[in-house]
Amino acid sequence: MTITKKLLGGIAFGAFLAGPALAADLPARVPVKAPPAVVTQYNWGGFYIGGHVGYGWGDTEWGFVNTPAAPTFTDFRLKGIVGGVHTGYNWQFDRWVLGIEGSVSATKMDGSTLCPNAAFRCEADVDHFWRAGVRAGMTAGATGNWLFYATGGFARAKLDTRTPVVATGANTASAGNHHHGWFGGAGIEWGVAPNFTVGIEAYHVSLGAERHFLPNGAVVPTFTRDVDLDFTVALARATYKFNWGAPVIARY
C-alpha cells in the first residue's frame, strides 16, 4: 500500500509540474464573436390621420373690368391663422417613403386696402382651402425615425370679396368664388412613438384668377373684378399612424 501511494503521488506531482508546459503548447482559444445587434427601423408605412395649425400670408390682385380698354388694378396683403385636419397613406421602401395626402383647412387670412375709387375699400378673406397631393422623402437617424420630404399637388380655396363704402361701412358689392391651382413645399417629421409623429411643414399655394361679380353686375358694373390669389403657409402638425398593412423593417 505504501509503494502504491508513493507511486500515485509521484504521478500526480509530475502531472502538476507538466500541466503549465502542456497548456503553453495548446493553441490559443479564439474568442466567439457576438452576433450583430438587430436595429428595428421606424415604420412609416400605412394609413394615418392628424391635425395641424399654423400661419398663412399672401396677396390678392384685383383687376376691375368695368373699362376693358383700360382696366384698373389694386393688390393687397392677406394674413392670418390656419388650422385643419389631414389624412394619407405611406409606402416605405428601405429608407425611401412615398405617400399620398389630403387636407382641409379653415383660415382667418384676410386683408384690405382702398380701392382705385377711394370712396370704397377692397376687402378679401380666404374662407377655407383644401389640397390633395403626393409626398416623397427619405428617413434619417439610427432608427430611421426622422423623415425629410417634399410635397406637392392640387389646391382649391374659397375667397370672399367685398367693397364697402369708406364713409359709412355699408357694403355695396360682395362675392365669393372658388380658386384652384397648385401647391408645393417641404417638411420634417419626427416619429416620437410607434404610432405618433410630430412635424413642421411649409408650402406655397398658387391659385389662378377668377371673376368675382354681383348678380346685378349689369346694374353695377363698376365692381365686376378678376381676382388672383397666392399665399404661403407654415404650420406644425401632429399625426396618429395606424400602421395597417405596413411591414416591420429591420436593419443589421
Image: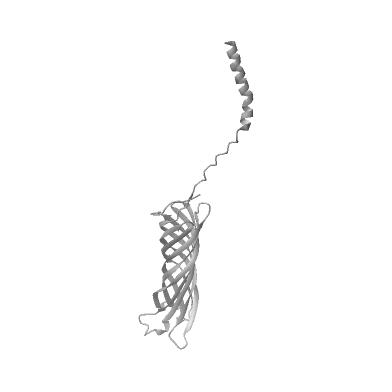
Is residue 78 visible from the viewing direction of this image?
Answer: no
Q: Is residue 209 above or below residue 141?
A: below
Q: Nearer the viewer, residue 97 or 114?
A: 97
Q: Position of residue 93 (x, y in %)?
A: 45, 58
Q: Nearer the viewer, residue 164 or 51?
A: 51
Q: Is residue 41 above or below residue 83?
A: above
Res 129 → quadrant: bottom left
Q: Nearer the viewer, residue 71 or 250?
A: 250
Number of labelled discs?
Answer: 0
Considering every residue shown, the one lying at the far bottom of the view is 69
Residue positioned 48% across, 81% down in the render: 73
Q: Position of residue 192 (x, y in %)?
A: 48, 52
Considering every residue shown, the one lying at the far top of the view is 1
As drawn, is 234 to the left or to the right of 8?
Answer: left
Residue positioned 50% across, 75% down in the render: 76
Is residue 174 visible from the viewing direction of this image?
Answer: yes
Q: Position of residue 155 (x, y in %)?
A: 42, 70
Q: Position of residue 212 (x, y in %)?
A: 40, 78
Residue positioned 48% across, 67% down in the render: 80
Quarter of the image for the N terminus: give it. top right
